[in-house]
Image: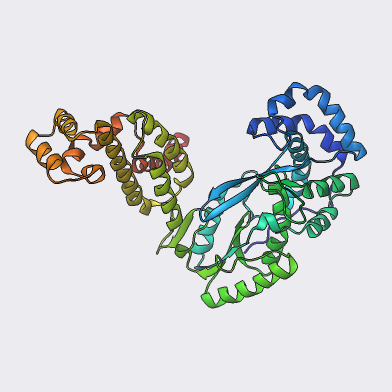
Amino acid sequence: MPKSKRKDKNDTSVTMEEVTNHLAEAFQSVASNRGAPGPDRQTIEEVREHLDDLLPTLAQALLTGSYEPGNIRRVWIPKRGGQRGLGIPNVVDRMVAEAVRLVLEPLYEPTFHAQSHGFRPGRSCHTAIAEAQKHLADGYGVVVDLDLEKFFDRVHHQRLMARLSRRITDRRLLVLIGRMLKAKVVMPDGVVMSTDEGVPQGGPLSPLLSNIVLDELDCELERRGLRFVRYADDCNIYVRSERAGQRVMASLVHFIEKRLRLKVNAAKSAVARPEERHFLGFSLRKRTDRVGVFLSVRTQQRIYERIRELTPRNWGGTLRACILRINAYLIGWLGFFGICTAGIEATLGWMDAHIRRRLRAIQLKHWKRKRTMVRKVIGLGVSPDVAKRQIYGGRRSIWPLSHCQAVESALRNAYFAERGLVSLAEQWRKKNVENSVAPEQLQLALG
């Protein structure tokens, strides 16, 4: 693998004066994110009202070293199989952390490894997947999938501060970052807990600090000449055989746990074929002439769960309102997963069919009585004999009725398309046709 181009790590430094010069810009960035209040319950608008008085006072406190970050409010957000802790600092503390990020990012960003894609300008999950495709195309068909257990909660403060001190010479800035790391956490029940390790997941500075920590892992992987892709704490290493993968896994677990003082989740880490693993929501499959990008099993399970949440049988609003809610989710979902390759079209078609069936069930529920259902489907073009036989026949509930011929003929695909329902399969085809035609059009225009 080609070596990444890294700048001299001692070519520049940063000072607290630079941080104070970025406070106004930092507030605008924090305000644009429209985050929730921290433990002090002060909103962004309340801070904005007295920002002109706050900025010089805050700058003076930072320069003299008297600034003390407040506590961090812990909230729990659901994730598959449990909950993830999110830390919400006070608005003023977020502003200071963002100012520090604005100063540190130009110092560290040019030195990060080319195969690091998480929380970096111009990089994303899509660029990570594209790099993984290249490794598989080059014949590295076995993946060492490393899962770092509770990474953000386990970052070793002393090791992180030692790495920062190699590049940052202004002691005031180092003390400030140390205080941010040690900020106490207010739990949902009001209990205040001290922080001995980890970085608060949810603060503006946390992504950059996590990359600084894991850059040491990137350097080690590069030193060993390994092919890899990392997005935050998700790291995949690509090798040619399972035997090589097992050897790499054992040595890297030792490096991560002994050197970095982090923990590898043995239950979620594995050496396997890429199609068997979940990487950033995708699974990769090597074909004869290309590497396909597909939805992972976990991603498919998640979207079906979300569809059920968005189309409850007891939906009390109008059908159009339900469709608008579904569309908002589907458009965003396809914006991320639309990079999947041709084999995904059938899967998207099944999802479309499932969504339409759930909407049919909602419509039948709104019609309530079977005689109303018969009258409505007849009005939509179904013959009376078919409508009565299929809807009155047997003691079928709403869900089986949503799949009978009479209801499907009345509430056909066009019925929902006319009401604005987005089709995942059609949107995917449109997007991929545009992408494939564009280069030809550009060539003709230039010719």
| Residue 255 in view, yes or no | yes
Considering the image in quadrants, where does the C terminus appear? Answer: top left
Residue shown at 51% from the left, 56% from the top? 81
Asked if residue 123 lies left or right of residue 167, the reply is left
x and y percentages locating residue 434 in the rendered image: 41, 39
Asked if residue 259 lies left or right of residue 80, the reply is right
Q: Is residue 328 above or below residue 227?
A: above
Task: Give residue 318's quadrant in the image.
Answer: top left
| Residue 113 in view, yes or no | no
Q: Is residue 205 above or below residue 287?
A: above
Residue shown at 13% from the left, 31% from the top? 378
Residue shown at 70% from the left, 29% from the top? 28
Residue shown at 52% from the left, 75% from the top? 242
x and y percentages locating residue 405 in the rendered image: 16, 43
Considering the image in quadrants, where does the N terminus appear? Answer: bottom right
x and y percentages locating residue 150 in the rendered image: 64, 58
